[in-house]
Amino acid sequence: MQLYFHESDKFPYRPISPIWMIIYVLPSFCFFIIVNRRVATPNKDYSGGKSTWPQRNTFISFIHSCLSSIFVVIAIIRAPEMLDDPLSHTNRFNYALAAFSLGYFLWDFVDCKQNSALPVL
């Protein structure tokens, strides 16, 4: 695999293969499907006839933001040199962190497409 390096980069880096990004994104997507099913309250409507989907979606978004925040702190602890040159420093954990968020955003897109009351393309 080719090593990418520019004279302004402090750390040379090797990009990850696209197949690995797919492999990293799929578990994240499935994780949020499972979380959505666990959070869903079947046959219980506490909102007086209103949809509980927006609250559930917001809660899952909160879960994603909490987990991502924890993972970012772990990423910085594991590789503090990333703070010196964040654009050229990468490692597999950082790729997995990006894939985790991408999996969430894909899940959120599908969830919004299925449950939104607004007409969607």
Image (spheres, helix red, strand yellow):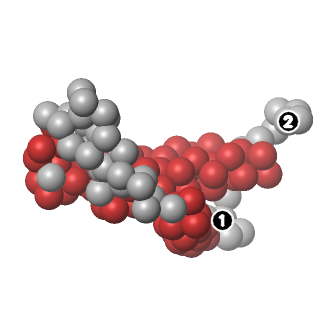
Residue 12: image location, x then y, percent: 26, 46
Quarter of the image for residue 74 reads bottom left
- For residue 39, say whether it is visible: no
Q: Which residue is mark 1?
A: 44
Spot occupied by residue 41 in the image (x, y as percentages of width and height) = 61, 66
**CA gap, disc 2 to disc 1?**
27 Å
* Vertical position of residue 53 compared to residue 21: above or below: above
Q: Nearer the viewer, residue 15 or 32?
A: 15
- Please, what secondary structure does the residue beneath circle 2 have? loop
Numbered mark located on residue 120 in the image: 2
Report if residue 96 is visible in the image: yes
Instruction: Report the side of 101 relative to 3 (left or right).
Output: right
Q: Position of residue 49 (x, y in %)?
A: 74, 48
| Horizontal relation, residue 7 to residue 23: left or right | left
Counting residues from the start of the chain, the first of labels 2 and 1 encountered is 1
At 51% from the left and 67% from the top, the residue drawn is 20
Instruction: Please tell me whether mark 2 or mark 1 is closer to you in this view.
Output: 2
* Crowdedness near tag 1: few (<14), some (14–19) or many (≥20) residues, C-alpha within 10 Å: few
The image shows residue 92, relative to residue 76, as above or below, that is below
- For mark 1, give the secondary structure: loop
Q: Is residue 5 above or below residue 28?
A: above
Residue lying at 14% horizontally and 34% vertically, measured from the top left: 84
* Amino acid type indicated by mark 1: Lys
